[in-house]
Amino acid sequence: MGSTVKRLDVVTDSTGWVAGSRAKGEFRCAGCGYGVTVYKALPSCPMCQGTDWERVPWRPFSRSFRATSSAK
């Protein structure tokens, strides 16, 4: 009935993410802290040439919005 698909191209263990891995989201370089947003594959860090990345936690409400009372 159901099939199981095993993703081999995405690193999800505690060792982190490596340049060249398919990924989508926000990441920080493990070496220097440089931040990138990627939609396909992680690059090498443009600042330190590092290859290890850490995922930035998703924060859906961290961006500030204009107060609705000021629009009245």
Image (spheres, rainbow, N blue to C red):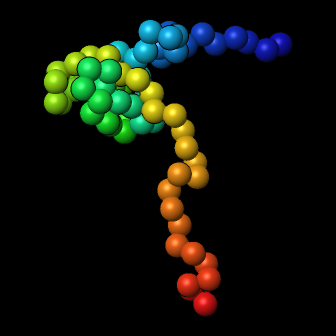
**Residue at 57% across / 75% down in the picture?**
67
Percent position of residue 18, x then y: 35, 15
Above or below 25: residue 60: below
Q: Nearer the viewer, residue 49 or 24?
A: 49
Percent position of residue 27, x then y: 39, 31
**Residue at 51% across / 62% down in the picture?**
64
Percent position of residue 38, x then y: 37, 35
Q: From this viewpoint, is residue 19 visible?
A: no
Q: Is residue 71 left or right of residue 34?
A: right
Percent position of residue 70, x then y: 56, 84
**Residue at 45% across / 33% down in the picture?**
56
Quadrant of the rendered structure where residue 20 is?
A: top left
Instruction: Looking at this view, name the residue that lies furthest to the bottom.
Output: 72
Q: Nearer the viewer, residue 54 or 38?
A: 54
Tell me the quadrant of the picture where the N terminus can be found. Answer: top right
Above or below 3: residue 30: below
Q: Is residue 42 left or right of residue 57?
A: left
Quadrant of the rendered structure where residue 51 is?
A: top left
Q: Nearer the viewer, residue 25 or 35?
A: 35
**Residue at 32% across / 16% down in the picture?**
52
Above or below 27: residue 17: above
Quadrant of the rendered structure where residue 59 is?
A: top right
Q: From this viewpoint, is residue 55 visible?
A: yes
